[in-house]
Amino acid sequence: MYCHNPDTIETSGGTEYEVEELVKMAKRMKPYFRANGGVTVSGGEPLLQSKELIPFFKRLKEEGIHTNIDTNGRILNNSAKELLDEYADLVMLDIKHMTEDGYEALTGMRNKETTFNFAAYREASGKKMWLRYVLIPGITNKPELLHAMGEHFKEYKTIEKIEIQPYHKLGVHKWEALGWEYQLKDARENTQEEIEEAAAILSKYFKEVKIN
């Protein structure tokens, strides 16, 4: 409901690239991102193309380029597992909500357990993960939800940080351009106090809390 790039929701269309084209683009950017950066695949949902991402990430690793997947965690098939286990240096996992009903209200799908199973799979691998959470007043910024997330993940060793994404309306015009109704138009942005309160709660559970 709050997607600020609704043009990426449609799974057809787009531009096709050969793997080597993308690798060349990434290599040209190495002087920019240097040792502290790399290549992130996002979407939409990048793991819809997990099979195709395997040779791409493999080539990036051969070039010494850090690899990252920005995902909502709803796909964990064999290709996704291979990509995660062998070639993904980092996973940024988007936690939509802490209840199944809340997850369905925001996304239209009952995928909370799938996302949490994805997190558990990544934790078992011992490989790095960040969590991301969009803070929406009255919907996801409730203290009980923040505490529930902290309690669920507090024993995880692979989570380096959680990133709070304060809700904004920068993508509303894109919904309008597509002729789609933006269903959160009555939601407001967070106050600074609300953001700080959320960060304080999450700081009790996570090593680092970053406000984006």
Image (cartoon, rainbow, N blue to C red):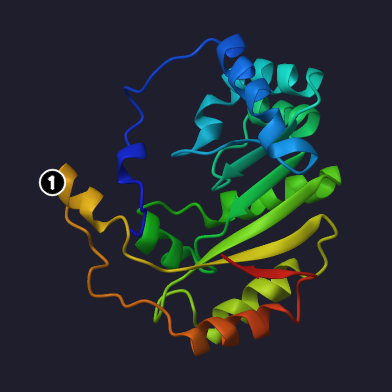
Q: Residue at x 38, y 61 (%)?
A: 106
In the image, is 185 to the left or to the right of 29?
left
The residue positioned farthest toward the front in the image shown: 31
User: Between residues 38 and 206, which one lies in front from this camera angle?
Assistant: 38
Quarter occupied by the N terminus: bottom left
User: Between residues 92 and 82, which one lies in front from this camera angle?
Assistant: 92
Residue 67 falls in image quadrant: top right
* Residue 64 higher or lower than 118, as above or below: above
* Residue 28 higher or lower than 152, as above or below: above
**Three-letter residue code for mark 1:** Gly
Quarter occupied by the C terminus: bottom right
Residue 206 falls in image quadrant: bottom right
Q: Residue at x 58, y 46 (%)?
A: 73
Q: How many marks?
A: 1
Q: Position of residue 88 (x, y in %)?
A: 73, 34
* Residue 101 higher or lower than 117, as above or below: below
Q: Position of residue 157 (x, y in %)?
A: 85, 59
The residue positioned farthest toward the left in the image shown: 179
| Residue on which the image places disc 1 | 179
Q: Residue at x 78, y 19 (%)?
A: 63
* Residue 137 higher or lower than 170, as above or below: below
Circle 1 crowding by C-alpha within 10 Å: few under 14, some 14–19, many from 20: few
In the image, is 2 to the left or to the right of 127?
left
